[in-house]
Image (cartoon, coloured by chain):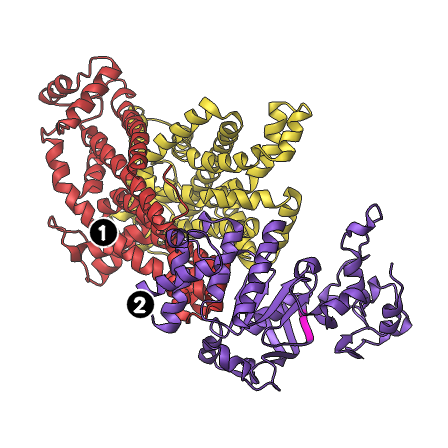
Amino acid sequence: MTLQNRDSGDSSVPLLEVEDLQVEFHTRAGVLKAVDGVSFSVDHRETLAVLGESGSGKSVTAQTIMGILDMPPAVIAGGAVRYRGTDLLGLSPPERRAIRGQKISMIFQDALSALNPVFSVGWQIAEMFRVHRGMSRREAKKRAIELMERVHIPAAAKRVDDFPHQFSGGMRQRIMIAMAIALDPEVLIADEPTTALDVTVQAQIMELLAELQEESGMGLILITHDLGVVADIADRTAVMYAGRVMEQAGVFDAYAAPAHPYTKGLLESIPRLDQKGGDLFSIPGTPPDLLHRPSGCAFRPRCRFRTDECLTEDPPLHDIGGGRGSACHHYQEVLDDAER
Amino acid sequence: MGRYLLRRLLQAVPVLFGTTFLIYVVVWQLPGDPFAGRCGDRACPDAFVNAMNEQFRLDEPLLVQYGHYIANMLQGDLGLTYNMVPVTDLIAQAAPITLRLALVALAFEIVIGVVAGVLSGLRRNSFFDNLVFVSTLLALSIPTFVLGRFLQWLLGVQWGIITPSVSGEATWGELIVPGIVIATTTTAILARLARTTIAENLRADYVRTAIAKGMPPHRVIGVHLLRNSMIPIITLIGLDLGTLMVGAVVTEGIFNINGLGGLVYDHVMRLDSTVVVPVATLFVLIYILANLVVDLIYGLLDPRIRYE
Amino acid sequence: MSEQLAQVSTSTRPRGLWDDAWDELKGRPIFWISSVLILLFILMAAFPTLFTRVDPHVADLSRSMEEPSAEHWFGLDRQGRDVFARTIHGARASIIVGLAATLVTTLIGGLLGILAAYLGGWADTLISRLGEILLGLPFVLGAIIILTTFAGAQSGAGPALVITLVVGTLTLLSWPLVARIARSAAYSVKHADYVQAARALGAGPFRIMFRHLLPNVMAPVIVYGSLMVATFISAEATLSFLGVGLRPPVVSWGVAISEAGDYIRQAFFLTAFPTAFLCVTVLAFVMLGDAIRDALDPKLR
């Protein structure tokens, strides 16, 4: 439907752009910088994988884009989230609501708790059409069935009146996806969409997301801690650590030659079939306490490339060419570091 | 559903028999001579003793007595008071008044309890929330009889807004203050439950989903949040219908209301226990029914409950 | 409800739970206010003579219903007894009944609940059914029936016996609630790996019940128990007010309110002082119970 004007949009303005985003949590123990100057963008037909451990600020970033952050305790301290050039952070709540769910939508990690337990899945999908499009109950239900078919739920017409708890984990996530794509959004944010699922089901969900993106041309932001899951369908990746972007690169580049010690560590800790028998690597140390961020580079205490410079100078995101960026003083060294 | 209902009913049977048996034993068996101190200050009239003995076979073994008692009750015959008034008549007169009182109390409980609880749950730590918290604290700390006596004195004696004791008709208007008195504790408990439930569900993932779907606030709260929160709230209200009818003993006594509670109160005070067993049985029945209804409502409200 | 309680207790390590709870309690003014009040009332119950030298039983009929004065702060009652002294001495009955009934109820209910969960089968059925039967009995009505039956038979009973009777009645009607909570909390860990492991290592039934099930039962039972004290004090006063609980010559707030009730028009102060003490005591225990519940049940912190 909106497919034509999508591609005819102003190509100089990114579809969705996050710029220097700062989100703080004001807690009893002090101010915690959950997101500290994060920037990235995503375009039509593009898939961005936002990678990071829990506590890296990736989910908070996603919630800020959606405008579903709990404020308080969260406070947006600065930056912008631009959708087609408009800063969403400056919009009024009703204006924001018109974009949420219709233009930018989101799916969550745990579909069982994210779906309302007391309404049938059909009702929950149909709600999108009834509230945003003013459709009648019956028509909305018909559309809900079509959507359930589109996300490959078997016997959709029969199961439309079932409740979330009557579905398997994978099917529930499909229902979440159906709900999220109901109004043909231009951006879909998937926050750890497969973490709670079995490995085989994970792949199926990823395939489904790729297929839907192919059909609609939406931009996709995949938030995950698991590089392996997204490698096949992501185009670019932004690696986050302690509320910052550590590295930005095409997925292939990042895989082939990481330019940040953290990315490198993440890759090395994935078990590989071709290195059977070897010791599994893990990044030493633990993620920093965001209330007491180390001076200089936040990754320094766990880094094997660290120097005295890292103790005092907080590295900016260096442009290292080829559309890549790395927030490491020693990115060249990391790039040159021989294959394990 | 039908099978579930049947099973729940069957489960209720032993409770009904057990409880009534217990009451029966305590009232008629344990005192030794069942007529000692039963008829107020005087000895029991022979006519009464004979009538009771004949009807309830008080000289026979306990189980036979109880069997007769149940058989009589099923035929609608509950015996006589020592003034030779049929207990059935007394109960028939009193029950509608108690039901009316319980409905007044329930209405108060629902309106005040749910509204206060929901609003304070939505605005946690606001001034209103603190006000509700302090009010529930006070409501839970004032024993019902104290509140009853106090309101009777303040509104009835000092200000003359209400008549201190309710007339035999027990009109709706007269029952408002007694109804509030009965409902005070349960209202506070309901408000607290509603507050906790709302505050908990407000943080639930599905509420976040509803917001992410672009639903307007009135829909997020009015449909998604409330529909889920109503499950425990309605459960408690259902149970309270029983509690309120039963809780009327003290309040009906204070306000001189001729309901079931007042009936028990009067007869206990006059040491006439003939009324106590049947009324208590009736209360147990109400309690069991209320439980059953609540179970069913629960199943209707929460699709996750299965009837098997 | 009980399921949620059980979840809370399984998800937290016992040690950490109590430490956290204490940290939480320490920071709450409501905890300190209620604790101080309760200590004051316990002191009043234990050593009433610390607060008043006047004998609560000394009557001067010629000064019946005298208004409060410098000499008699709370005035004199119908028999010309000092209301202040009687109010102070009245604390004892309330505190004893409230604490004793809670203690006995918690112990019996907790024990039966753990037994029901541990033994299962017919023992579980028996305990659960018995509990349901007792819960089917309306609380106040049940207490009235029991107390009139027993007290009617022995009208000359001494104060100790009457207090025992009241405590027994309250316990009898309330233990099933505690048993229900304890049972579900114990049941939730009965099949937990660490209990199975202990069993596999040859731990006997007592060890399993007291070392493994009991700690899990403690938190929810304590939460419930702390709120129960207030309920029992209120119930004692109600029963005494109705004339079926404590009765003269025992000095108690419920009795005092009952006696003063007929003269509420002429002498409001007779009702006001014991009522105020009663309500503040109940309030203190409700507040303490609230604070303990919030500390031990961290769901909404």
Left or right for A76, reference C264: right
Taking the view exactly as shown, the residue that stands out farthest to the top is B60
Q: Quadrant of the C terminus of chain A?
A: bottom right
User: Where does residue B217 sit, x and y in percent of width and height?
Assistant: 42, 70
| Element class at badge 1 | helix
Q: Is residue C229 above or below residue A72?
A: above
Residue at 28% in and 33% down: B6
Q: Is residue A34 magenta?
A: yes
- Give the number of the disc on residue B304: none
Residue B138 shows in the view: no
- Chain in yellow colour: C
Say what amino acid the circle numbered 2 marks: Ser
In the foreground, C175 or B212: B212
Graded by Cα atoms within 10 Å as few (under 14), some (14 to 19) or many (20 or more), the crowding at tag 1 reads some
| Rendering coords of residue B185 (x, y %) | 35, 51
Task: Check residue B103 in the rendering and tell me which mark sits there, or answer none.
Answer: 1
Q: Which residue is mark 2?
A: A136
Q: SS class of the residue under badge 2?
A: loop
Asked if marks 1 and 2 touch (Cβ < 8 Å), the reply is no
Q: Quadrant of the N terminus of chain A?
A: bottom left
Q: Which chain is red?
A: B
Magenta segment: A31-37
Comparing A48 with A101, the one in front is A48
Quarter-wise, where is residue B191 in the image? bottom left
**Closest to the observer: B297 or C150?**
B297
* Label 1: chain letter: B
The vertical placement of A109 against C9, above or below, is below
Query: Which class describes the residues within 10 Å of circle 2: few (<14), some (14-19), or many (20+)?
Result: few
The hue used for chain A is: purple
Q: Is residue A156 magenta?
A: no
- Measured as percent of width and height from the top left, residue A92 is found at 48, 81
